[in-house]
Image (cartoon, rainbow, N blue to C red):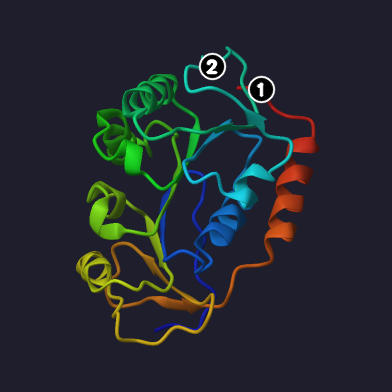
Amino acid sequence: MLTTTPPLPTSSDRLTIIGATGSGKTVAGVYHLSMMDLNARPWVIFNLKEDEHINAIEPARHLPLDYKFKSKEEGIIIVHPRTGEEEQVNDFLEEIYQRRNVGVFMDEPDLANRSNAFIDILRKGRSMRIPVITLTQRPVDVSRYVFSEASFIRCYYLNDDRDWQTVEYFTPFNGEMPLEKYQSFYYQVGDRERYWLLQPAPPVEESLAKIKAQLARERRFI
């Protein structure tokens, strides 16, 4: 386990964040989003859980799943898929895949597990300039591509042995190693000999303020 400062995901990477409810994964997700160049491309957030931290992002637009991108798109778009809307989620992901140069923030990929478009984004997103941040509390239930195609994996506390088994298969983490509240293991995929123990992410208010400040600047249309 390393104590040095770890490399952070960039806007060409795919980051997977894992953790039980209340572990701190959404706060970390918003933090990592705030570290991206949000003026280089639009970002779409799939807020399946209606998380309050995500809904507090300003100045985001809350739009329907059938939204069609404009020729010059910018900012953060939040969509609110519901159970039974798997087809609509896949269609919107296909829209992103075809357009390219759009970031995807997937808070619980339940409705995208069988989405061919989501799998294509995970597998080919780097070359298409589609960075991905995926959050999940049940690793055992999500597509293996969420882990196999990730560039970085950050893991918080999990309370199910089956979930730990999934995590241990794809990372050097050990479910028997203790984690204090809001701590996480962090791993750069490809180096199974090293990983980091990270302290809690900054308060979500700081990350929200950083996002708001970025989006308030004059944007570069794409």
Give the left or right position of residue 210, taking residue 160 as reference. right
Q: Total of numbered circles in the picture?
A: 2
In the image, residue 46 above or below residue 24: above
Quarter of the rendering containing residue 162: bottom left
Q: Residues within 10 Å of mark 1 (few under 14, many from 20)?
A: few
Quarter of the rendering containing residue 177: bottom left
SS of the residue under disc 2: loop
Q: Nearer the viewer, residue 73 or 136?
A: 136
Residue 221 image label:
1
Amino acid residing under circle 1: Phe
Quarter of the rendering containing residue 78: top right
Badges 1 and 2: C-beta atoms under 8 Å apart? no
Q: Nearer the viewer, mark 1 or mark 2?
A: 2
Amino acid residing under circle 2: Phe
Q: Nearer the viewer, residue 86 or 96?
A: 86
Quarter of the image with the N terminus in it: bottom left
Q: Mark 2 highlights which residue? A: 69
SS of the residue under disc 1: loop
Rendering coords of residue 206 (x, y %): 74, 59
In terms of sequence position, does the residue under pointer 1 or pointer 2 come before the other?
2
Q: Nearer the viewer, residue 74 or 167?
A: 167
Rendering coords of residue 221 (x, y %): 66, 22
Q: Residue at x 64, y 26 (%)?
A: 74
Quarter of the image with the C terminus in it: top right
Q: Residues within 10 Å of mark 2 (few under 14, many from 20)?
A: few
Rendering coords of residue 105 (x, y %): 49, 42
Q: Residue at x 43, y 33 (%)?
A: 82
Rendering coords of residue 207 (x, y %): 69, 56
Q: CA distance from mark 1 to mark 2?
A: 13 Å
Q: Residue at x 45, y 34 (%)?
A: 129
